[in-house]
Image (cartoon, rainbow, N blue to C red):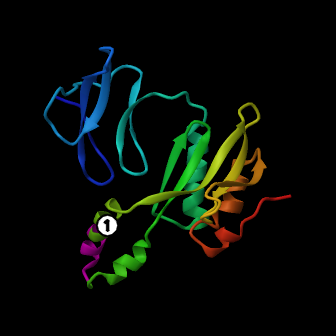
Amino acid sequence: MSVEYTNRRGRKHYLHEGKTKTGKPKYFFSMKAVGTLVNTIPDGYEIYEHPSAQVFLRKIPPQIITPEEVAIVREGVKKYAKLDDFIIDVKDNQIVVYLCDQNVDNLMEIALPVSSADATRMRATLIQSLSFSPTMQFVLEDVQIRTFVVERWCFLGSVDDWIALDRSTNLNALVKQYGQHLGKESFYELMPQG
């Protein structure tokens, strides 16, 4: 049986093996179940789904960020920003919060009145097709004492870069103080702390 993975959009992907120019094996996912399919994930590799829903096989990266730190950010966004439609991605020393580019509640209001069961199904289907953008990140600056820098994305066309807002060894405090602004107008007023 070949390695299969269904991404958040409900699309099934199959792991294939190819060859590099030098003859070494290379691995990739395709939605086609034909070709040289792979039966097991090679040692030292993992399946990674990018927030854009693209699926890759990648070498397992060193774990710099702990699962507990990821959970602090995930639960903090739910609690303080009161958001459901977001993605948390970990890349190297960064915990990145991706917010939905569309307003799911507004899109649901446009839909014809439906039963609550149909509305739940419709919302789940709708979320599969949404796009997400990086909005805030918590960057581990000092691995030993676990100092994080919180940054927000600047959406000004002339800037398009991360703006460092604050730093602390207390990730909970950073998430509480800055996470509450996610998805709100006050987000755009966040400026670096002196």
Which image quadrant is residue 13 in? Answer: top left
The answer to whether residue 173 is left or right of residue 66 is right
- Residue farthest toward the right in the current orientation of the protein: 194
Horizontal and vertical percent position of residue 160 = 61, 58
Horizontal and vertical percent position of residue 87 = 47, 54
- Residue farthest toward the left in the current orientation of the protein: 34
The residue located at (24%, 39%) in the rendering is 30
Q: Is residue 37 magenta?
A: no
Horizontal and vertical percent position of residue 192 = 78, 59
The residue located at (45%, 59%) in the rendering is 132
Dominant secondary structure, magenta? helix
The residue located at (33%, 52%) in the rendering is 8
The answer to whether residue 194 is left or right of residue 78 is right
Above or below, 138 against 153 in this view is above
Q: What count of labels does the image hold?
A: 1
Which image quadrant is residue 79 in? Answer: bottom right
Mark 1, Cα crowd under 10 Å, few <14 / some 14-19 / many 20+, is some
Kind of residue indicated by mark 1: Leu
Above or below, 124 against 186 in this view is above
| Residue pointed to by mark 1 | 126
Above or below, 123 against 70 in this view is below
**Most foreground residue, 124 or 129:** 129
Q: Give the range drawn in magenta.
A: 114-121
- Quadrant that contains the C terminus: bottom right
Horizontal and vertical percent position of residue 85 = 45, 63
The answer to whether residue 72 is left or right of residue 12 is right
- Quadrant that contains the N terminus: top left
